[in-house]
């Protein structure tokens, strides 16, 4: 009988105050590198990364009153590498980027970093809007040792070790009623 | 399932309401892509499409070609007039020869009704009908309905009159099927000789008086008189047709409401529609053309995305 690991006993990785502290820490780390965000923009990746981007932008506006925090949503459907390799084509989400990214520092945000394929597609999709000065990646959950591509995040909320059959689910207060990150095993 | 219920787009007849809505939702995002600085997405980069046109076309052909290029597909163009078809090659042979060069999809326009259906039964590639005789022109109907949806928010409950040569028009049949499927009310209007006898069985109203029809409708779709398809005289003269069924500014201004004017093109200015109407604020003719690319991108994207 193998020794039960932490995640087998309690699948919740983050919730309540710990979740808030993590978001706050990510905001402070961003401010450390981007000062007052006058030359930086936030882009959330559809569909689930936009909640993280919105939350971070909201918190930054509280910490930096009076400063403009630009935040957009990016859909990557048409840039994915698995088109014609799935049962049916994915239905795209909307893209809202009503600012110029040319010459800006862009922080891409997604809830979970796993294989890195989404991030590759996102970089492709983003470049259709211009040439940023610099691109960084912020993720709430980094599933380590599972990358298919050489992608690494610059800012990480929490790093977890998981196996392919497990699933990391991030819930948000706004849409799911609660801020929470859970690790599900075998679809449970 | 987020996939079309059909492997080919041969006609609106094969699409259900969900299919049409899926195409519209996808077209919305492609329209957004077309307004970006870089209007191209890489989705169809490993797909090769042959545009086979056995009949003349400007708009449809350019629109398909642009849609394919915006999706990064590789394309080959083929016009029957400059090909071996004039040497006596059959349709299946022509297409199979093109497919032997590893082509995944065929966009075809043909002067005979059912050419697309026939081809889909004999070749492996996915077929998109770009107009077959006087039968169907599905992408035109989709872009017409998409333009109405864009103008009014929805198609359901809207009253649309299709005016002109209903008998020879593939646009009319596809439009009727598409608009009915989306819950619109449809009326056809034209001289008795140009309205098929049993058109009522499609659930459309028939009216022979243009003014009455225009007073009833929200949208008027003015069709071209297809002189090239008329083997006999269906009305005494073009001048008489224009007097009875041509839309001019005077008629438009005399109506008690502001209707929207559409035309699938090519326009015969001064016949079915005068220049001042075609270029007026109420006309959405150029929006139709713009939407055509987005709608065709959606169709190609959704078809190509199905597993082989």
Image (cartoon, rainbow, N blue to C red):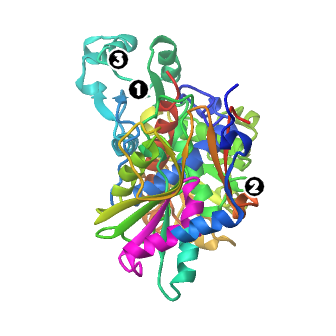
Q: Give the residue at mark 1.
A: B106
Q: CA distance from mark 2 to mark 3?
A: 43 Å
- Do the residues marked 1 and 2 share a common chain? yes
**B255 lies left or right of B48:** right
Residue B213, magenta (yes or no): no
Crowd band around label 2 with a 10 angstrom C-alpha radius: few (<14), some (14–19), many (20+): some
Q: Do the residues indicated by labels 2 and 3 lie within the same chain of the protein?
A: yes
How far from the left and from the top, in percent, is residue A150? 35, 43
Instruction: Indicate the quadrant containing the N terminus of chain B: top left, top right, bottom left or bottom right.
Output: top right
Badge 1 vs badge 3, beta-carbon distance below 8 Å:
yes
Left or right: where A130 falls relative to B160 = left
Disc 3 target residue: B99
Q: Are marks 1 and 2 in contact (CB under 8 Å)?
A: no
Instruction: Provide the secondary structure element on which disc 1 rests.
Output: strand
Instruction: Give the residue number, with chain letter if any, for mark 2.
Output: B157
Q: Give the residue drawn at x 45%, y 15%.
A: B124
Q: Earlier in the sequence, mark 1 or mark 2?
A: 1
Q: Which residues are magenta?
A: A26-55
Chain assignment, label 3: B
Chain ID at mark 1: B
């Amino acid at each position: 009988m193998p020794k039960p690991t932490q995640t087998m006993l309690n699948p919740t990785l983050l919730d309540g105050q710990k979740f808030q502290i993590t978001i706050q820490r990510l905001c402070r780390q961003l401010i450390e590198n981007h000062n007052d965000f006058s030359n930086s923009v936030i882009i959330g990746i559809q569909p689930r990364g936009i909640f993280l981007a919105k939350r971070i932008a909201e918190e930054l506006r509280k910490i930096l009153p009076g400063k403009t925090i630009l935040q957009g949503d990016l859909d990557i459907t048409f840039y994915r590498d698995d088109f014609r390799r799935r049962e049916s084509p994915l239905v795209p989400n909307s893209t809202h980027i009503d600012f110029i990214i040319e010459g800006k520092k862009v922080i891409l945000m997604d809830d979970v970093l796993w294989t890195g394929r989404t991030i590759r597609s996102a970089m492709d999709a983003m470049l259709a809007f211009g040439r940023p000065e610099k691109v960084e990646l912020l993720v709430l959950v980094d599933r380590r040792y599972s990358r298919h591509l050489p992608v690494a995040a610059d800012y990480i909320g929490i790093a977890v070790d998981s196996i392919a059959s497990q699933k990391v689910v991030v819930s948000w207060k706004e849409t799911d009623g609660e801020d929470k990150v859970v690790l599900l095993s075998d679809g449970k | 399932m987020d996939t079309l219920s059909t492997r080919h787009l041969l006609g609106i007849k094969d699409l259900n309401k969900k299919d049409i809505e899926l195409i519209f939702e996808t077209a919305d995002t492609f329209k957004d892509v077309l307004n970006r600085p870089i209007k191209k997405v890489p989705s169809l980069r490993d797909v090769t499409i042959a545009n086979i046109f056995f009949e003349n076309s400007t708009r449809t052909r350019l629109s398909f070609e642009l849609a394919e290029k915006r999706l990064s597909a590789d394309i080959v163009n083929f016009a029957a007039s400059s090909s071996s078809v004039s040497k006596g090659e059959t349709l299946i042979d022509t297409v199979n020869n093109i497919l032997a060069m590893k082509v995944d999809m065929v966009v075809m326009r043909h002067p005979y009704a059912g050419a697309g259906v026939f081809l889909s039964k004999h070749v492996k590639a996915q077929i998109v009908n770009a107009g077959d005789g006087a039968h169907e022109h599905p992408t035109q109907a989709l872009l017409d309905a998409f333009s109405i949806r864009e103008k009014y928010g929805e198609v359901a409950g809207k009253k649309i009159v299709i005016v002109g040569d209903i008998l020879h028009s593939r646009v009319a049949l596809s439009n009727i099927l598409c608009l009915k499927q989306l819950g619109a009310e449809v009326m056809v209007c034209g001289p008795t000789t140009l309205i098929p006898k049993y058109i009522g069985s499609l659930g459309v109203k028939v009216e022979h008086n243009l003014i009455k029809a225009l007073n009833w409708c929200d949208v008027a779709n003015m069709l071209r008189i297809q002189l090239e398809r008329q083997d006999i005289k269906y009305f005494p003269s073009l001048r008489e047709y224009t007097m009875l069924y041509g839309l001019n500014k005077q008629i438009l201004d005399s109506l008690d409401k502001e209707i929207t004017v559409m035309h699938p093109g090519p326009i015969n200015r001064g016949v079915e529609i005068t220049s001042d109407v075609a270029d007026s604020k109420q006309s959405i003719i150029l929006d139709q053309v713009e939407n055509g690319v987005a709608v065709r991108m959606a169709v190609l994207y959704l078809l190509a995305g199905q597993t082989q």
